[in-house]
Each structure stands twice: as structure tokens, then as C-alpha cells.
Amino acid sequence: MPPPEAASPNPMLQLSVHSLPAAGASAVQRTRLGRLKMLLIWAVCAAPVVASYLSYYVIKPQGRTNHGTLITPPKPMTAEAGLSFTNLQGQAVTPQALQGQWLLVSVAGGACDAACERQLYLQRQLREALGRDKDRVDRVWLIPDQAEVRPALLPALAQAWTLRVDASRLSQWLQPDVGQTLSSHLYLVDPRGDWMMRFPADADPARVKKDLMRLLKANESWDEAGR
């Protein structure tokens, strides 16, 4: 009598056995995924800033020239660099208080001679010429001495920052062109507080305005009026 055939195994019991993942594998994957998400978020946030600067600094149509001199790399206005300001009432103003707006900066002693008055007038006219974009730009007059400001100048400075600053600290942040003094130029500071452009002595107002308009246009997607 032939031996009985071996019983077929129950198909419900035919299970595949797989190796289990290492204990820390899922945690490592989650960490990597989290880092990747953070990098993507950073890239999305930084893209408008990077694109606007590239469009101005790098992607330049042939034959286009800036009237102002680009400062490379830009120089930050920070308390860590030793910069501190006081207003005409002697109250402290931190560098952070000036951030969040474009700053059109002039430098001159408090006595403010005729050249200083012309610079302050040009500064005010340039801001007004920006039209609806003027609220994205603040005027700043930095005074590197303790000379008294004439009362006759104050009405025109009502909408400007008029700040005293230590001369030696200021000279470590802003620098004039060769053969010029700090008071010879207007300086442009971006909303992050970085000095990034110096306009020439006896600058052409029309060309300064054109530089300002190009910069404001390039950055309008992320830079809004007000702080």
C-alpha cells in the first residue's frame, strides 16, 4: 500500500518572512526628510531676494552702467561693528531701528555749510522724485561731530533721521572714493542694513534716480513700504 501523500500546507500559513528594519532607520529617515523640508522652505523664502540681486548685479543688459559704485561685499550696519547713534535730543538709536527701509545717507558736520545744504536738498528731491516708491526710502543725515544744528534746517529734516555718530566708527563702515571725503557722497543702504552703493561726488541727479528706480523695481516683490 503506497504511503499516503503528505498533506498540503494550509495556504493561510504560507507567510513571507522579511527582515525588520534597523531600530534607528525610521528616525534617520524622518530627520533627513525634516532637513530637506527646511532647506526647501529656506530656498522658497530666499528666492525673491536672490533673484532681485542677481537681476541687478549680474543680469545686466549690454551697455548698461550704474552711476553709483556697487560695494562688494556689502558692509553691514550693526552694533557689533561698533556703530551707535543718538538723535538731536541725545536719545540712543540702534542700528536695528534703521533697518527695514532703503536708506539714502548723507554725512556732514552739524554746522552744515553750503555744500552740506545742497546735499540735503538733493537727498530730499531724489526721494520725492521716486513717486509712490518714496515711502520705501528714508533720508538719513549722519553728523560725526557735536556741532549744533541750525534751527533753520530743522523743518526740512522733519521726515528724516538726523543722527550723531562717532567719526572713527563711521569711517570704519562708510568709505569715500579716492581723493574724496565722506561728505562728498550720498550712500545707499539696503533694508537689511547693508551699505551697498556709493554715488559719486557731484552726482547727476537723473542718473542717481535711475539707479534707485532700478533697485526698487528689482526688489518690489519682497520689499514693502514701512518697517
Image (cartoon, rainbow, N blue to C red):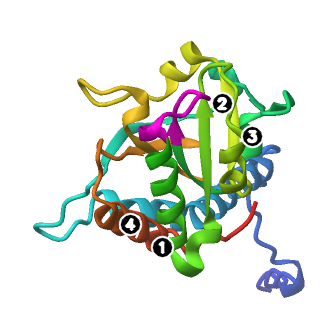
The residue that label 1 is drawn on is 129
Camera-side mark, 2 or 1: 1
Q: Do the residues labelled 4 and 1 touch (CB within 8 Å)?
A: yes
Q: Give the range drawn in magenta.
A: 106-116
**Residue positioned 78% across, 33% down in the render:** 88
For the residues labelled 3 and 2, the Cα–Cα distance comes to 7 Å
Picture coordinates of residue 191, whole percent (x, y): 61, 53
Q: How far apart are marks 4 and 3 (CA)?
A: 26 Å
**Which of the two residues, 197 or 90, is positioned nearer the viewer here?**
90
Q: Residue 96 carries which label?
A: 3
First reached walking from the N terminus: tag 2 or tag 1: 2
The N terminus appears in which quarter of the rendering? bottom right
Q: Nearer the viewer, residue 66 or 186?
A: 186
Q: Which of marks 4 and 3 is in front?
A: 4
Residue at the front extreme of this rendering: 152
Residue 70 magenta-highlighted: no
Q: Earlier in the sequence, mark 3 or mark 1?
A: 3
Q: Nearer the viewer, residue 82 or 20?
A: 82
